[in-house]
Image: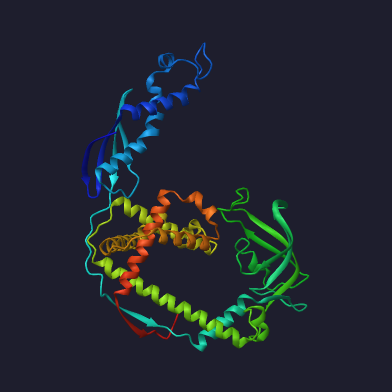
Amino acid sequence: MKLNETKKVDTNLYELNITVDGEQYAKALDASFKKNAAKLNIPGFRKGKAPKSIVYKMVGESYFYEDAINSSYGDAYEEALKESGLEAVAYPEVELKDADGTQYTFVAKVTVKPEVTLGEYKGLKVERESDKVTDADIENELNAMADRNARMAEAPEGAKAELGDTAVIDYEGFVGDVAFEGGKGEDHALVLGSGQFIPGFESQLVGAHAGSDVLVTVTFPKDYRATELAGKPAEFRCHIVEVREKSAYELDDVFAKEVGGCQTLEEMKQKLRQSLQDYYDERAEMEVQDTLMRQAAATLDYTPSAQELKEGIDAQVELLKAQLGRKGLTLEAYLQFTGKTEQQIRDDAKPEAENSLRIQKSAERIALLEGLTATDEDYANELAAICRQNGLTMEQLKPHMNAQFEASVRDNIRMKKAIAFVRANADVTVVDAPASKD
């Protein structure tokens, strides 16, 4: 490998002109020949047994260049990158310039970490809210738990179904007078208002009682997954087998035992108070750390590269997808509901992506200035934490533990240490929190 030239072409962007020749290329060509010649039909020879000169005469030497180049340019790039002293932040764009039987030359466009300068990050001032759990908080949480864990009981005879009740139904769907595939069910428990069935279906069962028959008329959405039904009017012939209504818990010792795992309601209140207080304290501390790092990042002389910004926006969009997934939604459904395009979502994500990059670069700079490192012990502890959080054994994690994985984990350790350093050296004033809470 020869690094012919290192040229700066833009902010944080360099071009490396690299030639691969000699033994390195010869080995790659030989491996390519062995791999690909075995696939060729050469008259008079079994596959893979024809002499190299005969094979070259039949298909040409250049037939083997592509595999040879693909298998060797990665190592050549890594060697050249190390020799150049550049620190890449993304995979390079590679362009082949020329190739023959003795060498090939390519150009790698490398996005590098920018040089950044950081202002003051010690002695930053911030207020920390002291949020105390109130009796009203406890009462609200107990009522919410009672509602979430409400038992379903058969409604009294003749009781009419309401939103929130469960209707146990037999049903069959028809388009015209023809029953359609997948449109029939028996003893199906449907929570009215849950949105489990297509729009307009559940609301037509409100007011029905056990034993009654209801004809539900709907129109399938135009984007319905079964394309043969999309946009078509249909009717469902439903029979109400049973109506079940919520039977809420009383806030008593029975509730404490069955829902809270406590012997008495008073014991449950005490545990809930401590749990809520821990949550409030953790939330307040996270807000303090976020505010401090935003203050530090505001002093940073740094402009992200186009590639860094793209990857930062990608990360924000993936975070949104994960948040939607926890609510049972997809990004496509969210776009449809909000009336936005994916490009608008990316545009909206840009400011927070920039801010996250600034905080990341600030933490990297602080770690460097303060000599904060990720030791082997830190790394081992972080791996153990990853296993605990994801329910994995170390053996299950090992297949994912390549060089890129380790670098990412160690970067995360240094970032945590940098944030902890800023927090430990900050001037934090404790103030009473506002009366209302989220």
Q: In which quarter of the image is the N terminus?
A: top left
Residue at coordinates 41% horizontally, 53% vertically from top-left?
406
Answer above or below: position of 28 versus 91: above
Res 314 visible: no
Outermost front residue: 377
Viewer-proximal residue, 219 or 68? 68
Colouring convention used in this rendered image of the protein: rainbow
Percent coordinates x, y for residue 110 in the rendering: 29, 44
Residue at coordinates 25% horizontally, 75% vertically from top-left?
123
Outermost top residue: 44
Viewer-proximal residue, 409 or 61? 409
Q: As drawn, is 249 to the left or to the right of 299?
A: right
Q: As drawn, is 187 to the left or to the right of 131?
A: right
Percent coordinates x, y for residue 251 in the rendering: 63, 85
Viewer-proximal residue, 282 or 122? 122
Answer above or below: position of 15 versus 46: below
Q: As drawn, is 299 to the left or to the right of 378?
A: left
Percent coordinates x, y for residue 8 in the rendering: 21, 44
Q: As drawn, is 335 to the left or to the right of 123?
A: right
Report which quarter residue 6 is drawn in: top left
Percent coordinates x, y for residue 100 in the rendering: 32, 23
Q: How many marks?
A: 0
Q: In which quarter of the image is the C terminus?
A: bottom left
Viewer-proximal residue, 204 or 293? 293
Res 205 visible: yes
Answer above or below: position of 90 versus 17: below
